Structure formats: structure tokens, C-alpha cells
Image: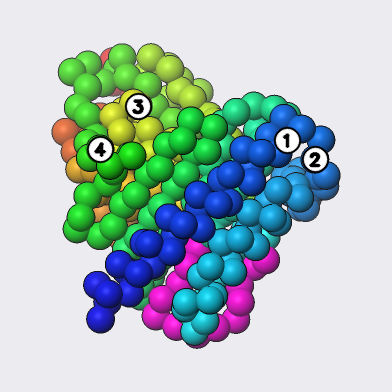
Amino acid sequence: MEEDIIRVAKKISITAILKAGQVAKDYFDKGIDLQEKDIYGDIVTDVDHKAEKIILDEIMDVFPEHQIDSEESGNNGKTSDWLWMIDPLDGTNNFAIGLPIFSTSITLMYRSEPVLGVVYEPLVNRLYITSKEEGSFCNNEQLQVKKKEEIKKGTIAWIQGHKVQNDENAVKLRQHLDLHFKRMIRLWAPTLQWCMLAKGDIDGIVLYNSEGDDLYSGILMVKEAGGIVIDFEGNPFNGMNEEPYLIACHPEHKEYFLRVVTEGLGLIEEVN
């Protein structure tokens, strides 16, 4: 039963996300309507709404009883073991200023665990698909998190929630990470950073209190590509958490990441 639902959900998600992605592609770098949507200066565009409607219509047509939590429309109020999490335009700020780094993310959760993730990067036509115990793929090529021979020379990504943007510990940790890796990137499109890690293009992610409709597709993508996702104490991250603090990397880099993060937070003295 569960497998059948996931199989149908995957088919629907692919159809919906390709349509939504085409809308984003058609409108990119053209005149768009936008407005601020919260006190943190985050914005929403008409493209967010158009893409979201396409996805929601496809899902509700087949699974009207499922719970849905979408970036712009919010929660549909249904009670179900199945929860869809939709980010129709992850990287809206990039999109709005003509920076070609954005994607669409669809996640299906079953009893608070991600079982399906579909991410589409329309400008380069990259379709990422992952499902529980079936691996992660980009345009049908299987993904694998890579081990870096010298992790200090690695490239990592930083993800941070809006509400902790100026958090003193976050600022301190960012600076420390910047000193202990070759470079640290911050794309303003978190889902793509998770996909880059799963693909082997970057070497790790440090996430500081950032949960959203774009998170769990990425977590599943990395896990199914052989990576680990742990909290700042080194415990495996499962389920859902409204205030996650996470590290994602190749399993053999776990101790280095934990050490650097702990040092950066000032919990232990730095050892050269």
C-alpha cells in the first residue's frame, strides 16, 4: 500500500514539477510582481503563486485526503499520515534579481519521515529524484556523496534560518567555518545545496536553525546518496524538527565536521 502511494506520488510529482519549472523558466529575468511577505524581508512573486497552483492542483486531484504544507498557501488543515511539503520557488530572492540559481522542491513525508523528494532546476534542466531505499538520481544518473582526501580543502555550504540571521553564535560559527575549509558558499537556495552535496559537487553542509518546506527533500537526497545527516552533538537526524541544527557530509568526515562546529560555537578550545 505504502509503496503504491509512493510510486503514484513520484509520477505526479515529476509531471507537476516539470510544469511548474517551465513557468519559472518562462518568467525568469522578465518583469515580475513581487512583495515582501515577512518582517525578515523575504519576498514572494507572482511566479511563486503560479507554480504552486500547478503543483497543488496535480496533488489534490489524486490525493485529496493528504495533508499539504506549501510555502505560500500554508497548511490545508487535513489530518493524514501523509504530508506533502511544497516549495514552488526555492531561491525567490535570486529569481527576483536575475540570479539564475533557484529550483522547485516537492517532498512527501510518511509519519514524519521523508519518503520521496523531487527537485527541479529548470534553467539547466536538472531533475533530481530520491525515494526511500531506492537511491538518489539526477537525470537518471545515480548520485553519490564523495569523500574528500583533504577535507580542509573542501567546499561546504551554509544554510541559516531567517529568524536567527544575526544570532551571535551563528556569526561566530560562520567565521570559524570559513577559516577551516577552502570556501563556504551560501546560495540562498538551500535545496540546491543539498543536491550539490548528494551529487558530489560540494563536501558538506552546516545548517543553523532553518526548517522549511525545502528541507526534507534535501535530507533524503543526501542520505540516499550515501551521506550522513547529524545534529551538532553527532546524533543521526531523523523525523522532523522545527529548529534543526545539522551537519551533512560523507560518513568519514563526521569527526572533523563535529570538531570544527563545536570549536566554532566555543564549546571546546581550538586545536591546531
Q: Amino acid at mark 2?
A: Ile
Q: Secondary structure at mark 1?
A: helix
Given residues 72 and 243, the one toward you in this image is 72
Q: CA distance from mark 3 to mark 1?
A: 25 Å
Q: Which residues are magenta?
A: 73-85
Describe the colour scheme in one phrase.
rainbow
Please report the residue visible at 46 percent of the width from the left and 57 percent of the height from the top.
15
Q: Amino acid at mark 4?
A: Glu
Counting the numbered discs, the total is 4
Given residues 15 and 253, the one toward you in this image is 15
Q: Position of residue 95 (x, y in %)?
A: 67, 35
Is mark 1 in CB contact (under 8 Å) with mark 4?
no
For the question of whether residue 247 can be seen, the reply is no
Please report the residue visible at 80 percent of the width from the left and 40 percent of the height from the top.
32
Q: Amino acid at mark 3?
A: Ile
> Mark 2, residues whose alpha carbon is within 10 Å: few (<14), some, or many (≥20)?
few
Tag of residue 141 = 4
The residue to which callout 3 is attached is 202
The mark nearer the N terminus, 3 or 1, is: 1
Please report the residue visible at 28 percent of the width from the left and 42 percent of the height from the top.
140
